[in-house]
């Protein structure tokens, strides 16, 4: 009898469900059985071909089909059952200098990357590659042995897969450090705003040409030059970053209220979040006044040129 024997832990029911769900795809092509066997405090899952002794060639083909689909089922189970545990182990082992709260945050970032919650194309390819690595390792193993202990296989036979997870964790750590640096930067900017008295009550920000910004006071009088002149004098024309100029100007003026007109025209969406984070409770997004309409009209005119 041709069969595969998979030694498992307390998750036998889940694995059997994965295997049965996968084998349903070929139920009209081969005859098979899947059963759980318990002995000496161990549990095994036996997946076997119901052989037709008169057709050995067909039996060999059926066994190869069984191997492929069981490998697919086990790969899905490993990803769903082991992946988070492996990532946690990597973080605790390789990045023990972070405290428990930080390690938990790194885990969250790693899981977000690995589940491709941001719908990133490269991450989608990476997901497919990881699964294929597991399937290939399982098939290679089944070529030489029909008996597999799942825990041991994951821990000792999937080095390439675990290396991929280590790279994901490394990427998550880099992202965590950047986010932490950003939060510290925002906290510092908020402190600068809080320690000074407002120089104006309201500043209106309108998107101008070439990602430049127009600043207006509460009476809609332009004050752009007054706000940015001291910064312009210190930098050359080629080095001007108008996003940075806007943030610096707002921090210097420390207005009680900031009205951002036609926020949809802001090319740098992170800039909007930065302004809202530095000036919590002070920012109003306006998308319907005359200033907004003027900005939109200028933007459309620019597209037509």
Image: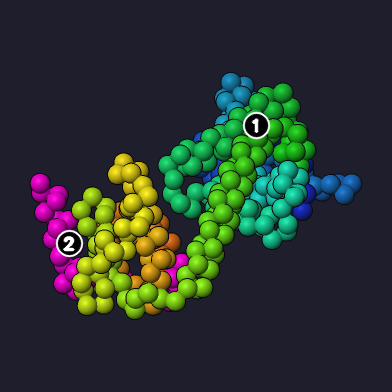
- Vertical arrangement, residue 19 with respect to residue 243, above or below: above
Q: Choose between 67 and 141: the one closer to the eye.
A: 141
Residue 86 is inside the magenta segment = no
Q: Give the range drawn in magenta.
A: 278-305
- Mark 1 secondary-structure assignment: helix
Residues 6 and 79: in front is 79
Pointer 1 residue:
160
59 over 222 or under it: above or below: above
Query: Can residue 69 be seen here?
Result: no
Measuring 51% from the left and 73% from the top, which residue is drawn there?
A: 195
Residue drawn at 37 percent across, 74 percent down: 199
Which of 167/132 is in front?
167
Q: Quadrant of the N terminus?
A: top right
What residue occupies the far top of the structure in this picture? 57
Horizontal arrangement in the rendering, residue 49 relative to residue 38 (left or right): left
Q: Mark 2 points at which residue?
A: 296
Q: Residues within 10 Å of mark 1 (few under 14, many from 20)?
A: few
In the shown orientation, is residue 218 left or right of residue 116? left
Residue 99 in which image quadrant:
bottom right
Q: Earlier in the sequence, mark 2 or mark 1?
A: 1
Q: Position of residue 86 (x, y in %)?
A: 70, 46
């Amino acid at each position: 009898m041709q069969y595969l024997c998979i030694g498992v832990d307390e998750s036998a029911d889940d694995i059997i469900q994965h295997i049965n769900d996968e084998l349903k795809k070929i139920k009209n092509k081969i005859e098979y059985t899947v059963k759980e066997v318990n002995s000496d405090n161990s549990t095994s899952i036996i997946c076997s071909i119901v052989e037709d002794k008169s057709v050995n060639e067909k039996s060999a083909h059926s066994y190869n089909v069984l191997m492929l689909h069981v490998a697919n089922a086990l790969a899905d189970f490993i990803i769903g059952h082991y992946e988070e545990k492996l990532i946690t182990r990597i973080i605790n082992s390789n990045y023990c200098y972070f405290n428990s709260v930080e390690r938990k945050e790194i885990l969250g970032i790693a899981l977000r990357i690995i589940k491709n919650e941001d719908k990133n194309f490269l991450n989608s390819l990476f997901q497919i590659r990881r699964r294929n690595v597991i399937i290939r390792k399982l098939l290679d193993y089944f070529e030489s042995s029909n008996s597999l202990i799942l825990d041991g296989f994951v821990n000792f036979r999937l080095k390439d897969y675990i290396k991929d997870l280590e790279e994901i964790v490394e990427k998550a750590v880099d992202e965590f450090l950047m986010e932490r640096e950003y939060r510290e930067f925002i906290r510092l900017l908020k402190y600068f705003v809080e320690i000074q008295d407002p120089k104006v009550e309201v500043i209106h920000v309108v998107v101008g040409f070439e990602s430049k910004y127009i600043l207006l006071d509460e009476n809609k009088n332009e004050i752009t030059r007054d706000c940015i002149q001291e910064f312009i004098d210190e930098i050359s024309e080629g080095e001007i970053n108008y996003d940075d100029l806007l943030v610096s100007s707002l921090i210097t003026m420390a207005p009680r209220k900031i009205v951002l007109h036609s926020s949809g025209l802001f090319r740098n969406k992170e800039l909007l979040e930065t302004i809202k984070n530095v000036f919590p409770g002070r920012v109003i997004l306006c998308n319907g006044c005359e200033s907004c309409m003027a900005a939109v009209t200028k933007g459309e005119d620019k597209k037509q040129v």
